[in-house]
Amino acid sequence: MSNSETPPNASRRRLLMALPLAGAGVVGVAFWKMLSGMEHGSFNPHDINAPVLNRPVPDFTLPDQPPMQGFNTQDLRNLTQPVLVNFFASWCIPCLAEMPTLMTLKDKLTMWGIAYKDRPENAENFLKHSGNPFSRLGSDHEGRVGIEWGISGVPETFLIGPGGVIRWHTAAPLTDDILNQTLLPLVEKLKTP
Amino acid sequence: MNMRRFLAASCVGFSLIAAPALVLAVDDPMEMLPNPKDEARAEAIGSQLRCLVCQNESIEDSSAGLARDLRRVVREHVAKGENNQQIMDWMVNRYGNFIRLKPAFSFSTLLLWCMPVLTLLLGLASAFIFYRRRAAAPPSPPPLTEEEKNRLAQLTKDKDNAP
C-alpha cells in the first residue's frame, strides 16, 4: 500500500523543521559573542564616535582652567609629540575612578585636560583632591567644545598625534589594561625621535 | 475612607504635581525660537537626531544635558538660515551616522533598506513556485484495484443497511 511508504519529501520537511532551531542557534551564538565581548571590553555598543579618528582636531579655543593655561586648535596642531586630551568633570564619578590611572601616566605622556560642563572652582578643587596629571587645562563650561569633539559624556579620552591628528579615542574610563595593551604601544609608535 | 480611595486620590495628586514638571523638563519654552516656522523646522530636525546619552530617544524627547545642548545648536543653525541637509551634515560630521535615527541610504545600508522588498519578493516567488508545482502535478491517486472496489461496495452496502 502507498500509505506505508515514506513520502519523498519527508527529509525536506525535517530540514524545514530544523531551520527555526538552527536560526535560534545562530542568533544565540551572536548574542553570546556580543555579551562576552562587552565583558572583556573588545566590543562596546556605546562607543559611538569613530568619525573623529584620523582627522585633525576640531576648531576650538578654551579659556584657562586654573591652575593651568588653556589651549586651542593651533596648540594641538603645532605638536611634535603625542599628547593625551582628557575630558573630565568634578561631578563625574568614573572620572574620579580613572584619575589614579592618569597619575601613573604622568611621567610617560603629556596630558592636557578639559573640564567639561563644570564650574572652574569645582574643577580646581577636584584636581586638588585627586591629583593633577595635566600640564594644560581648558574650561569648557558650556559644553560646546565637547560637541565639536563629538563627545557624548565624560570621561572621554583622545590621543593626539604630531600635527594635531586624532589617533585614538575611548569613551570609557582608562584602566591599566587599556594603557598597557593599547595606549602606550600606540604612543611609542607615534613618538618622533 | 478606604484604601482604594486613598490610592486613587494620591494617584491624581501625584499626576497633577508631576505632569507639569515632566513637560517642562523636556520642553523649556525659553529654548524655543520666536518664529513658529523656524521652531517647527528645528523640531523636525531634532526629532531625527539621536540623543547620545539615552540612545533610543531623539534630542527633542530627551531631557539629558547633552540633548538640551544639541537642541540649542540646532536652533542656532536654523536661525542662521541653514537648510536641513547642512545641519544634518554638521551633526554627522561630529557624531557619525549613529546620530541619525533614520539611517541614510548608502552602500552599507543597502541591505537594510532593501530588506522589506527582498522579503516580499522572496515570499511571492516561493508562493508562485509552490502553486505552480501543485497545479502541474495534481494529486491523482491510482485507480482502485478489483479487490478494493469489492471492499468499497461491501462497505457502502453495510452502511445502506444500517438503521
Image: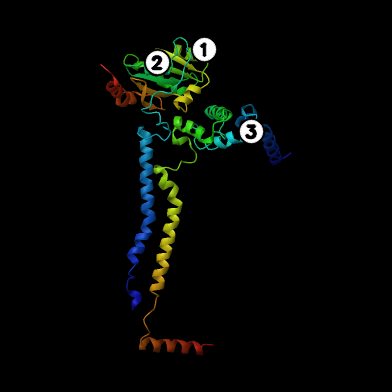
Is disc 3 surrounded by few (<14), some (14 to 19) or many (20+) residues within 10 Å? few
Please name the amino acid that badge 1 sits on: Glu
Left or right of A186 on screen, residue B94: right
Question: Mark 2 falls within which chain?
Answer: A
Q: Name the amino acid type tagged 3.
A: Val
Q: Between B88 and B162, which is closer to the camera in this rendering?
A: B88
Helix, strand or loop under label 1: helix
In the picture of the structure, the residue carrying the numbered disc 2 is A75
Name the residue furthest right. B1
Q: Nearer the viewer, mark 3 or mark 2?
A: 2
Give the residue at x 39% y 88%: B149
Q: Residues within 10 Å of mark 2 (few under 14, many from 20)?
A: few
* Sequence-first disc among 2 and 1: 2
Q: Is residue A11 left or right of residue B76?
A: left
Q: Image quadrant of residue A52? A: top left
Q: Which residue is mark 1?
A: A121
Residue at the spot of label 3 = B23
The crowd level at tag 1 (other Cα within 10 Å; few <14, some 14-19, many 20+) is: few
Is residue B54 shown to the viewer in this render?
no
Give, as a three-letter code, the residue at label 2: Asp
Picture quarter with the C terminus of chain B: bottom right
Q: Is residue A83 above or below residue B113?
A: above
In-image side of B128 versus A183 (left or right): right
